[in-house]
Each structure stands twice: as C-alpha cells, then as structure tokens.
C-alpha cells in the first residue's frame, strides 16, 4: 500500500515522502520536500495526497517516477491580510489611496520594526513590498497630503456612527530617544518613565471606548497641562463641534485649562488632587470628622483658585454648585471607597517605614515623604502623616456640569472611563511600539506617529469587533498560510486548517 510518510530531519524540518510498506519495511518511492512551518507541512501533505489519488505518472513500485521534489512557490497569510484589509476599508481609510501607506500600517500591526525591515515582514505574510525608496517618499506624502487629518476625520465619522462622542477622554505620554543632544523637538523634560533622555510629549484623544480621535506631538519640555486645549481645539475645528464633555486626569488640572475649556462652552471632568480635600470637605470634617461610609459621594464646590472655599460650617448641608451663584467656584465631587482606603493605608505604612529608616540612617535618599529636616536633624513629620491618614479612600473630581444635568455618580463613572485611553497608550507603546527610535527629523517623527495612530484605530476597531486584542489576532491568523506547491508539472494550493480562535475572528469580522 502506498502512503505518505513524515520524517523529522537533522535540521528540524519535516520531510514528506511517498512510501510503500514492503516486507515490514517502509520503502521511499518519492521525496516531496521538507517543511519548516505547519502551513508548509499542510501543503506538502495535500500535494502528496493529490498525487497518490490521481496516480500522477505511473509509479513503478521499485523506484520513484520523479527525481524532482515538490517546490513551494508561494505562501500567504491570506486570512490575516483579508482581516486587516476589511478593517481598513470599514474605517474608510481606502480614501487615502496610497499602497505604501497601507503597507507601513500593516507592518506596524503585524510586527513593529524599522522601515527597512518592514519589507521582510510584509514578504513573510505574502505582500509584495514596495521599494524602500517608495516607503521613504510615503513618509513625506504623509505630511504634505495631510494623511493624519484625513485619518482623523474618518475616525471621527466611525466613532460618531458606532459609538458616543458626546464624551471624549484625553491623556498624555512621553516617548524618549536614545540621543545625546537635544534639538527643536526632542528635548529633555519631565519623563513618565523617569528618564533623562531627549523626548517628545504625545497627547491622545479617544472616545469613551478607547477608539482614537486625535493625536498631537509637542516638544519634550512642553508642560502636560498646556497640551489639552490645543488638541481639543484642533478636534473641534476639524469636525465642527461645539458641545461635548472632556475627561482628563489630575495632571490636566490647571486654572487656565479649566477656564479656557469653560470659555469654549465645553464641559469637563478632571481629577482633583487629594490635597484639596480638607478645604473642599471642611463641612464634612467639621460635622463628621474623618468618618466616611463605603461608596459615599459628597457633592460640593471648590474654589477656582486656592485651596479653601468660603466657611459654611454653620450649615451641615453642602452647597449645590451653580455657575451664576458661584462664579468663583467649580463643582467638586468626592468619593470614598473602603478598598481604596485599605490600599492608601498600605501605601502610607510603607512610606512611613521608609521615612523612619531614613531618620535612623538605615536608608540613604535625598528626600522622602514624611521626613522633616530641621537644624537639630531629621524627624518624622507626624502632622503630615496624620493628615494623610485622614484622607485615605478619598478621590476627588472637578467639573462644570450642573448636578441637574449629570448626577454625581455619573460624573465619577465617566471619569473612570479614562482607563480606555491609558489602555490605548499601552497598546501603542507595546503592541505597536510607538517610540520612533529610527527617526530623527520632525517630519519623519510626525509621519511615524500618523502611522501609529492609524494602526491604533485598526487595532481598536478589530478588538471591538472580535473581543480579541490585536496581538492575539496577529498570533492566531499569521501562521495560517495558503501554500502553493509545484509538483510533477502541476500547481497545487493548500489552505490551512482553521483553529477555533480563527473561526471566531473571521466570523466576527465578516458578520
């Protein structure tokens, strides 16, 4: 009986042979080829089965009828490419009409690497890469033809039809360069990664599901608080918007920012610093001390400048914020959670132990919290520690949205959607490797960020459709390749066997 035989070679490949069982021994009739991947193996097995079943040539059972093995002529991760192309078209990015731009975005999604190495990535999945010079010219076209603006408008249209853009989330991050010298863009500044290298500051605006809407690049020493208003104004002007809610963390809490957002008739929700709690919650501390109940919300007012509000301890009830009645104040909401209190207490205990170690000389640091230095030496700042203990479990929020429009619980819930923009930044930094380590000029860096922004939109779209991260989608579909094999003068194409995850992805993308 003639059958297919698989043999592991010394190089680690799998040889596929046509063999016959004779006198309790396997006699090789023909060697078809060696496979290095599951896709190649599937192709060779399929080719062997078709050759046996069709009786290619007349097999003389004593010798092989063909001396030329099967040859793999092409491989393509067709399912992966169709998935990416479907997302590209679904988001309206085909309007760009630049194959090189699509290839750069696809390579960023499949395996982030340098522009030069992108050709290898594309070839491995079955895309004929454009010439490197074409890619370089594409970087220039990204700026001159305003690809970012076109992509941003398509992203807005997608978010407007499939989600909710009445509330947008904003955050910033820093991307560093391993460069010795600063220039007009790459400057040393406050680094979220605590580095002293030249860097850039990147601001990202997303919808409440994390889908990207706008991106901006600033000098490395640009203050974070000065990035939000330009990005918001750019987003408004691009899409002719007037009414929406902007959510940002406490890092954006500056009097100038809040005033400008308010003057632009925009609503905002920003995190408040815990140090403002004693002033905002003077009533509560006067009548209740530092006692709170789990889940308690206190809706009050906070001064636009300074840390204390007018004394109202004569009345136990907190004032209800009104723009006309309290022109020098914003609405302030404080939330208490027992789990947060436990976590805060644990952190304070660790900081107290560290402070005591510094005071005792067991630890050497330049400065640490709760260490008071006087002429007589170092001592524990018990007053500051006691004050910090009284504020554990509290989280504050500042807004200009009236209570009649949005209840306190909804304000808190909307703020907590910020994790979506943080996740988008993590996706950009890890899955898409946003750090532009191979670029030096401002135009090239901006073009790189446009590619990352576009890739992030596709990644977020596919994640929303499939429920899988872009990393899992790539890992699932990339190995599933269609293989074309030439054998005995004939060409055979073998399709991969789908996994359960692959079926799930393809079903969600096509329905």
Image (cartoon, rainbow, N blue to C red):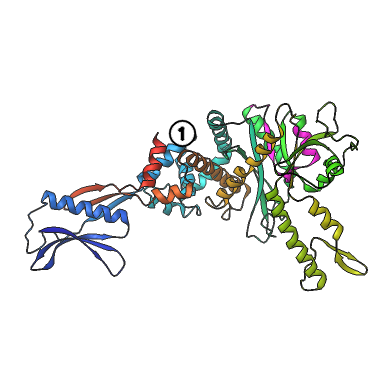
For disc 1, the marked residue is 90
- Give the percent coordinates (x, y) of residue 241: 65, 27
Q: Is residue 260 magenta?
A: yes
Could you tell me residue 64's position as x and y percent? 11, 61
Relative to 346, residue 251 above or below: above
SS for dot 1: helix
In-image side of 77 versus 72 (left or right): right
* Residue range highlighted in magenta: 240-261
Please check the rendered image and state whether residue 151 is part of the magenta-colored stretch, yes or no: no
Which quadrant of the view contains residue 355? Answer: bottom right
Q: Residue at x 48, y 47 (%)?
A: 470
Query: Which corner quadrant of the image does residue 166 belong to?
Result: top right
| x, y percent for residue 121 | 43, 52
| Quarter of the picture holding the C terminus | top left
Q: Is there any visible trace of residue 204 in the rendered image?
A: no
Mark 1 surroundings: few (<14), some (14-19) or many (≥20) residues within 10 A: some
Q: Nearer the viewer, residue 453 or 391?
A: 391
Would you say 315 lies left or right of 234 here?
A: right
């Amino acid at each position: 009986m003639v059958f297919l035989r698989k043999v592991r070679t010394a190089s680690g490949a799998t040889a596929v042979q046509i063999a016959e069982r004779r006198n309790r021994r396997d006699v090789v009739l023909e060697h078809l080829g060696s496979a290095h991947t599951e896709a190649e193996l599937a192709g060779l097995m399929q080719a062997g089965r078709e050759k046996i079943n069709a009786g290619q040539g007349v097999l003389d059972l004593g010798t092989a009828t063909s001396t030329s093995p099967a040859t793999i002529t092409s491989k393509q991760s067709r399912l992966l490419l169709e998935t990416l192309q479907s997302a590209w078209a679904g988001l309206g990015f085909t309007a760009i009409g630049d194959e090189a731009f699509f290839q750069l975005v696809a390579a960023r999604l499949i395996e982030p690497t340098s522009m030069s190495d992108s050709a290898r990535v594309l070839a491995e999945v079955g895309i004929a890469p454009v010439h490197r010079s074409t890619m370089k010219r594409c970087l220039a076209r990204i700026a001159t033809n305003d690809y970012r603006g076109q992509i941003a408008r398509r992203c807005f249209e997608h978010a407007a039809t499939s989600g909710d853009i009445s509330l947008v989330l904003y955050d910033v991050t820093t991307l560093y360069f391993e460069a010795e010298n600063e220039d007009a863009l790459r400057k040393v500044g406050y680094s979220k990664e605590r580095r002293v290298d030249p860097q850039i500051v990147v601001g990202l605006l997303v919808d409440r599901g994390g889908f990207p809407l706008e991106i901006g690049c600033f000098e490395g020493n640009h203050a974070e608080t000065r990035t939000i208003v330009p990005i918001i104004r750019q987003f408004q002007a691009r899409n002719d918007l007037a009414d929406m809610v902007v959510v940002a963390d406490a890092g954006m809490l500056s009097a100038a920012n809040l005033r400008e957002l308010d003057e632009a008739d925009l609503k905002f929700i920003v995190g408040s610093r815990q140090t403002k709690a004693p002033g905002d919650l003077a009533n509560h501390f006067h009548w209740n001390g530092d006692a709170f109940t789990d889940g308690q919300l206190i809706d009050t007012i906070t001064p636009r400048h300074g840390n204390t509000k007018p004394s109202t301890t004569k009345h136990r009830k907190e004032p209800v914020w009104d723009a006309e009645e309290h022109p020098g104040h914003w609405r302030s909401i404080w939330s208490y959670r027992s789990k947060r209190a436990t976590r805060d207490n644990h952190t304070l205990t660790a900081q107290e132990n560290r402070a005591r170690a510094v005071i005792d000389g067991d630890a050497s640091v330049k400065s640490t919290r709760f260490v008071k230095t006087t002429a007589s030496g170092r001592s524990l700042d018990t007053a500051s520690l006691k004050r910090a203990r009284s504020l554990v479990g509290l989280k504050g929020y500042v807004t200009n949205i009236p209570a009649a429009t949005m209840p306190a619980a909804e304000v808190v819930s909307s703020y907590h959607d910020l994790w979506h923009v943080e996740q988008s930044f993590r996706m950009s930094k890890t899955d898409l490797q946003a750090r532009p380590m191979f670029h030096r000029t401002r135009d090239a860096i901006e073009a790189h960020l446009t590619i990352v922004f576009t890739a992030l939109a596709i990644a977020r779209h596919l994640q929303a459709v499939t429920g899988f991260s872009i990393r899992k989608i790539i890992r699932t579909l990339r190995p599933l390749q269609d293989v074309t094999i030439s054998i005995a003068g004939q060409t055979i194409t073998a399709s991969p066997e789908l996994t359960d995850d692959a079926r799930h992805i393809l079903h969600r993308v096509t329905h």
